[in-house]
Amino acid sequence: MYNANKVIPGIIIFILFFTAPIWLNFGRLEAIPQPELPKGEKKCVESKEYMRAYHMKLLDDWRKKAIRENQYIYINSKGEKYRISLQKTCLKCHNNREKFCDRCHNFVITHPDCWHCHFTKEEAKKWQ
Amino acid sequence: MALPKPDELLQNVNLNRTPSQHWMDIKTEFKPGTYCYAVEPQVMKDLGLPNLGSWQPHDEKWPLPENWKEIVRDAIKTRMERFRSFKLFMDICVRCGACADKCHFFLGTGDPKNMPVLRAELIRSIIKGEFSTFAKLFGRFAGARPLTEDVIKEWFFYFYQCTECRRCSVFCPYGIDTAEVTIIMREILHELGIAIDWAMKPVRFSHFIGNHIGIQPHTMKEIIEYLVADIEEITGVKIEVPFNKKGAEILFVPPSGDYFADPGIYNFMGYLILFHHLGLDYTISTYASESGNFGFFNKLELAKKLHAKIYEEAKRLKVKWILGGECGHMWRVWHQYHNTWYGPVNFLEVPKSPITGTVFEHAKDNKIIHICEFTADLIAHNKIKLDPSRNDHVIVTYHDSCNPARAMGFFEEPRFILKHVCNNFVEMPENTIREKTFCCGSGSGLNTDEYMEMRMRGGFPRANAVEYVHKKYGVNHLACICAIDRAVFPALMNYWVPGVDVCGVHELVGNAIVLDGEKERTTDLRYRPLKGKEEEV
Amino acid sequence: MNVGWSLLAVIVLLLIPWIGVGVLGLDSLFGIVIPYACFLVFIIGLIYKMIYWAKSPQPFKIPTTCGQQKSLSWIKHSRLESPFTTWEVVLRMFFEIVFFRSLFRNLRAELQGRRLIYGSAKWLWLGAILFHWSFFIILLRHLRLFTNPVPEIIQGLDFMDSFLQTLGVPPVYITDVLIIAGLTFLLLRRLVDPKVSYLSHGSDYFPLFLILSIAITGVLMRYAIKVDIYGVKHLTLGLVTLKPTIPDVKIGTIFYIHIFLVSVLAAYFPFSKLCHMVGVFFSPTRNMANNNRYVRHVNPWDYPVKYTTYCEWQERFRDLLEQAGLPIDDEWCKEQQQTQKTQ
């Protein structure tokens, strides 16, 4: 091999760059957080699978309906009626933002807009 | 076939129309005027090289040796092992097409195989088709094809339709250099015994006699003495030219075109006048009487063979350093290859101008200097007495000869000189000069008469830029620093832009230098009257 | 033809995981085995390629000079276009690789009657830079799925890329738009420009279609056919921590299509023109200094050649030299003979 003094460092940089995900976690890997599900309620407005993938879309639709169209009734895929309200419907069961919402969102790095306006009961208590 | 008229030549050229057939299906046609004649077998025999006997490219069946395929495959493999450039360039082209309309041969023919990318694809497809199992499986989809006799013909046609000018390499995002590919492909063809006569005869002459045209030492001396007599007639000053002088400080090696052919001879007179004016301690050698190198247009080994003489001569004459004349590909070889071939050059000293004391640091390892570097330094130090008005009959533009431009970065030195020795210097359009300069269309050993149509096509982009300044500013001289340029531009100008003469930079220097004790000059070095002296002549 | 076959190839590749996961339920084959295998092919293949190139020496120093050489002290030399020192070479390579400097020079030549006209043609540069930079940022951004906790810098990158929050939930990634724009341009250019279309192989269209489908599946997954990203990160984090698992909850098939196409791209990379990613670093016309006469370059396979020596030449022309009054140097020839004997 010729120019090994340049090619070998080059190869090492190449390997380091493309294996970055492996060593970036080295020594600082944290356990995957488990969101805490509501204790009492077993049923959400839609199926568990749908909620895991599409909740942000549902919340966004709710926001538009409530604020822009003045509609407060949501009929789910099974025909059941729910009141459109983050505070009064969602947060009623999922009452702990830190243990439910944030655990996932911080894990996958998404930035929900919800908390720009809303806050949970615990937070409200802190302020009082 | 007669050469078509300038207006007819480009009639069928359309840069945006492509043939309906796939390029792999188009067979090469050998029409007169578009290919060079095959080498005479005796030339190859004399140099101990393989040959195909007597044949011509337009023959239907080429007399290839029985094991030609094996030879080609081995030749490719060897080159891959020896040249990283070749190996890499065969792998990394993405066919983005940035180079497509950069080649002067493409612009003058519209033939898609003259797009640098397709020119390289001519061999890339064979490497895929012969050596890669995967590509073989996918065939044309992956750009692979088998090696056939037609491919050899195609290689011959298109790799002798590239002048190794490197313009495409400037624009390629990976720096793929078609010159490198062409050099290697010509070597591979050489292994079969395929070469062109025009590029090989000069090699034989250079090897056995010392220069391209086979001028023997006594004739060389005679010719130069004629030039000296002309100088005396024009300037009234008698110049001594030292030949093979031992212990001289500088060995000057000019391209033989400069003391052999018009208009190179005027350039040579320019060199002589300059050296005399300086009282320079130099010598010309009749053994190393050629700085150009036709070996380079055939095979790197041949190139090395030819220039070895220069260093032996420098050693024998015990000079301190070497000065090279104005020449294009020559300076690519001198600048990029010499030091690798002949170094370390310990028997010489770091070049130092005896007149200005400038040490040419950038050449401290190889100890060779371009005459324009030398002269520019003199002018900058005000060491030459110049009368630029003696070039007032000249409106000059400067052609960046491709190889000094793109293999050396030689842009400012000649311009600096021109601006000091002439009062009328004009640049050609921006996209046709400096690193984007266009080839003369006849470089790399293609400056033969049987190739005239292709030369006029290849030279068209350059000529077109000259035409522009000729019409706009009345430019009547095209200055260049290349012996092949000086040999081929007169024909090209005559064809496309009548009324433009061709000259070397040092011819104009020679016109402008005011020698001690000279008489009042009435003509330039070509015996043409100077401005305002028309009646006296 | 080439276009059709390339498109067909990509469609077939799309169908493989669709059937494999959607119908046959081979989640761990497509989620674990194939990605691992293809990643290894990518890494080993490219290392192989680099060593393959490095095994051949660069015999001569052949930079393409696009600017003034360093010569006389009072002439300004072009540090980027005609680098003299290693540092200048590094700068030249940096601009070449990061900003595609050579491509930026691009011109377009048009023949109008008997006149050649040159115009600036930066579209190719723009398309290329959009595509490559977006691809690079997207690649880095994906680290959010491969690290836990996610490094701040990646979080910042992700935040910046998605700062346009007006176009719905979740916010649009700017690079998603740009990469598709860039790829579409490059594809259309290849189809529409007669010259480029003529010189394109099937293998030039294939990677464009492949990367375009990767981008499109990714975009679909984010905005339309959503998948459980929490589940996805379970899988991806499992891959990089070498504890691969398929999460209990079913992730949508589109995810497997996306990751399969990425795997194919990775495996295809070293053995195709895409290897220009590492190849560009090896380019001798760009990565060498234009200081040939200052620093000698050594060719490892250089060999001596036989040339006509002065003495051979003098013998041949002795009479003519004498007649012309040119000096004869027998001393030198004796010296040469002696040195030859002693050797």
Image (spheres, rainbow, N blue to C red):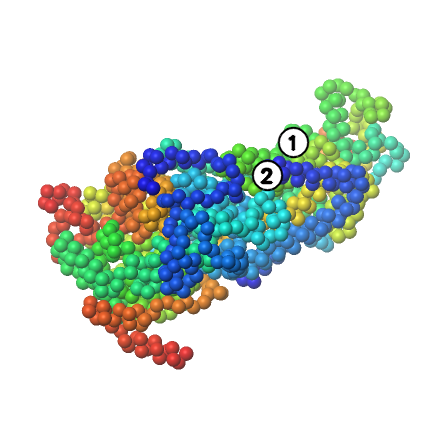
* Residue B364 visible: no
Rendering coords of residue B124 (x, y %): 53, 50
Q: Using residue C160 as the reference point, say whether residue B522 is left or right of it.
A: left
Specify the label residue B426 is tagged with: none
Q: Secondary structure at mark 2?
A: helix
The percent position of residue A99, horizontal first and vertical second, equals: 80, 40
Splitting the image into 4 quarters, where does residue B50 fall? Answer: bottom left
Q: Residue C2 shows which numbered tag? A: 2
Identity of the residue drawn at 18% across and 60% down: B225
In the picture, measured across the screen, residue C116 lies left or right of residue A125, that is left
Which class describes the residues within 10 Å of circle 1: few (<14), some (14-19), or many (20+)? few
The quarter of the picture where residue C114 lies is top left
Say which chain tag 2 marks.
Answer: C
Front residue of C302/B423: it is C302
Q: Position of residue B180 (x, y in %)?
A: 46, 53
Specify the amino acid type for callout 2.
Asn
Q: Name the residue that disc number 1 marks.
A: C165
Residue at position x 23%, y 68% from top?
A: C320
Q: Please tell me whether residue B207 is drawn above or below residue C209 in the rendered image.
A: below
Q: Quadrant of residue C129?
A: top right
In the displayed orientation, state which residue is furthest to the top: A70
Residue A117 located left or right of residue C204: right
